[in-house]
Image (cartoon, rainbow, N blue to C red):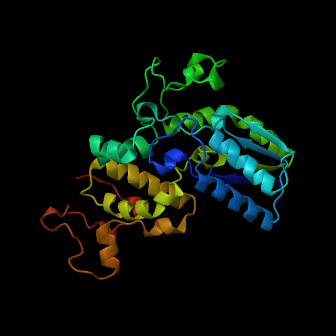
Amino acid sequence: MAKLVLVRHGKSEWNKQNRFTGWVDVDLAPEGIEEAKKAGEKLKKAGFAFDVCFSSYLKRAIKTGIIILEELDLLWIDHLKDWRFNERHYGALTGLNKDEVKKEVGEEKFLLYRRSYDVPPPPLSEDDKRHPRFDPKYKSFPIELLPNNESLKEIIIEMKLHEKVHYDFFEKEKEILGFSEAAYALLNAHNIEIIEHDDFNAFAHKAQMRLCYNAQEEIFDITYKQVKELKKAGVKAADNFLPPCSIRAAQNIKPICPEGERFCGVKVWKLNFDEYKRLI
């Protein structure tokens, strides 16, 4: 049976600075190099070996791959690079500090830019020096292939066009190692928006508040969809992503609704998750 192992690149310099990175070719930070070495050591200890590996065009992914392959003594295998594994393009947000953007646009719009399935961030103009057409790596690419921003939906469509390459490898029962920022766009997981590992605990807490019927409608809808997708994927922790009233009811805390006079009028704690419908 073929195996696919996915590894996120090590911490980059812009990760440390909390900046939107996207297609900018930022290098690994020293911590990222150590993370890659540890990943290689763990894979070696677990007995993994590979026939081929993939990475994006970005050096943080490429170097992560090289470091891990060196730990596995597999530098000789094919290391194939494809621009379609690049991180999603953050458009005009590229290079900006995430906290500053949130402060400027508000949490609602910030959440849409980062987590929405089909809402892309503001686009770059084609004469903006951050546009991929000014990067030598893409000089031979038709301009229409180079994004000025991307939503998750657009990445999925892009990956579907490329899926035959990966199926061909699996049909030959190859062991594949993949280094990519865009793990949420993987072909067999494209219906799930994967939350970055360092955000998961924060998401769990925020999901409870955002599933309250008093939450802003757009925020409620996005969060409900995310939790539903996680449940569908079999993530057990998602069963605990409930609105505050449901959590309080389960713990027999009174009053059940913590909103006081702002009680929405719906006894949400008596509903199954599939019955949630914010109509107030």
- The part of the image, by quadrant, that contains residue 78 is top right
Most distant residue in the front direction: 30
Residue at screen point 50% across, 49% down: 15
| Depth check, front residue: 221 or 181 | 181
Image: 16 above or below 271 = above
Label count reads 0
Residue at 38%, 60% (x, y): give it: 207
- Vertical position of residue 280 compared to residue 55: above or below: below
Q: Position of residue 199 (x, y in %)?
A: 46, 58
Left or right side of 209 for 120: right
Classify residue 270 by image quadrant. bottom left
Residue 172 visible in this rendered orientation of the protein: yes
- The x and y percentages for residue 118 are 45, 37
Q: Position of residue 204 (x, y in %)?
A: 42, 63
For the point 38% across and 43% down, which residue is it?
Answer: 112
Quadrant in the picture for residue 121 = top left
Spot the residue most to the left: 261
From the top left corner, tell me how far across and down residue 68 is, in percent.
74, 53
Q: Nearer the viewer, residue 189 or 196?
A: 196
For the N terminus, the quadrant is bottom right
Up/down of 199 relative to 113, above or below: below
Residue 46 in view = no
Residue lying furthest bottom in this view?
252
| Residue toward you, 1 or 104 | 104
